Image (cartoon, rainbow, N blue to C red):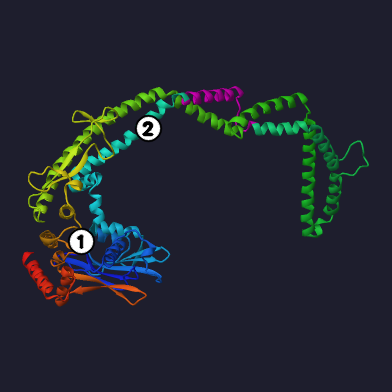
Amino acid sequence: MVFHVLEEMRIRALGVIDDAVVELSPGFTAVTGETGAGKTMVVTSLGLLLGGRADAALVRIGAKAAVVEGRLTVDARSAAAVRAEEAGAELEDGVLLISRTLSAEGRSRAHVGGRSVPVGLLGELADDLVAVHGQTDQQGLLRPARQRQALDRYAGAAVAGPLEKYAGAYRRLRAVSAELEELTTRARERAQEADLLRFGLEEVAAAEPHPGEDEELAAEAERLGHAEALASAAAVAHTALAGNPEDPEGVDAATLVAGAHRAVETVRSHDPALAGLADRIGEVGILLSDVAGDLAGYADNLDADPIRLAAVEERRAALTQLTRKYGETIADVLVWAEQGAARVAELDGDDDRIGELTAERDALRTELGELAQALTDARTEAAGRFAEAVTAELASLAMPHARVTFAIRQTETEEDGIEVGGRPVVFGPHGADEVELLLAPHPGAPPRPIAKGASGGELSRVMLAVEVVFAGSDPVPTYLFDEVDAGVGGKAAVEVGRRLARLARSAQVVVVTHLPQVAAFADRHLVVEKTNDGSVTRSGVKAMEGEDRVRELSRMLAGQEDSELARAHAEELLEAARAGR
């Protein structure tokens, strides 16, 4: 049995799908149906299961949520299994269960191996498990930028290594160039900034403030401005505590406390409790004496000096000029001065910095030119192999005389370029190469861009050939193709089916198709069927085997599943597919 990853998918309340089970073959599974909506929902469901964008509109009207569940067979040593186990998931006999729930309100939840995980983990696992190729990818590959990405992906490490170094040097060049442009174009503003900073620094230096000086001066000004009131209050308090020598009859706190102490001291021996109170009264007396002494000293030392007060106010006014401009406090002003001095040193060093940046820019341009040349060489070598492989695939897709080539070129420029191959050329974040896929559909026809040189059917086959070549170089075990055979018919469709069947020998292949010639080559044929009870449309997925498969192919061939001629053609097609694999 071919190694496969997707065994089964269950879908509930998703768009037109309601409680359907999709069993996938380990080889080639074809999905068909009368209309595209049901088939599209199968692809959409797989997309949700693999971490794709969730849209609440996908939930069936009237349902609370849509749920997609999947069974995957994985190697326990694979990167996907290791990553799932790191997230807490459990594998049972090599089977990994994953699910995605989307509520009608738009909330999305994911579970892997019985453990709730971020939805982003599904995308990480999908990178190692499934490669999805659809009509959107076809249109995207028509753009040169996508063609360059495709070539780089095919080239692998030969391009990835130089491209990583190139990208780092490119980012540094952008940063250096931006800084250099700022220094040169804003020279006048920077000179004005330096002058303003110097003026401020000179003003701060002239004042010579020290940390906390503004707070100290404020306290001193408050004291000097109220010296008389302070002295009077201190004298009154001293008299109340220690008494007035000129008034022997006056009563003071110290005398009263001393009397209280004498009264209890004489009887303290009779009661320990009273002895404790006596000690505390004694302590109060000592404290009153100390406070009275300090009040006397305070009053003696307090000097109402108007000259000193004027000097203090003058100094405070000078400091206020600084705090109005450079900070709320003198401490903030000193911090500003320190930062301003550093900024002035930086601005004064602009000339030196411009020289350094110019030298670095020139060195980076030289380095980028060498790396761009290495990228061109690696892409050219890979382009030959890629084009040869795609051309070989086209021969298997009924285009035996078609030839695919790559045009790799650079655009010369007179300014702001890098030198590659002795010429100044335009460059960007991915190098200097412009990559374009060309097709010559028959001998004698000039190679033209595939968007212009191929018909609809030829374009589909070219894109399919590109996808198959990618499949050969990708390590993922499962490939999902969503109608990449659009625009193909007749013998070419048979060759498409045959090629997909051969691809399924080494990988699991799931194809959503409208072509009976392709579906006939499948190992398993699934049909999305719609039912309508007049109010609700539902879809289910049914496996076609034996007579049912013949009827489905007849319908696809002629639209008449009961036509004897169509049935004979379908049986012939199935027999030819079995023989031609």
Which of the pair 370/341 is nearer the observer? 370
Depth check: give the residue in front, 570 or 484.
570
Quadrant position of residue 396:
bottom left
Tell me where residue 272 appears, x and y as whole percent: 77, 59
Q: Tell me: 332 left or right of 125.
A: right
Q: Nearer the viewer, residue 117 or 211?
A: 117
Q: Residue furthest left?
A: 579
Residue behind mark 2: 178
496 relative to 221, above or below = below
Q: In this picture, is 217 found above or below 22?
A: above
Distance between the alpha carbons at the discs numbered 1 and 2: 46 Å
Give me the disc on residue 396: none
242 falls in the magenta region: no
- Furthest-right residue in this view: 249
Q: Secondary structure at mark 2?
A: helix
Residue 570: x, y in percent? 12, 71
Categorize mark 2 by other alpha carbons within 10 Å: few (<14), some (14-19), many (20+).
Answer: few
For image coordinates 32% across by 35% down, the residue present is: 172
The magenta span reads 189-213
Amino acid type, label 2 = Ala
The kind of residue on which mark 1 rests is Thr
Q: Which mark is residue 478?
A: 1
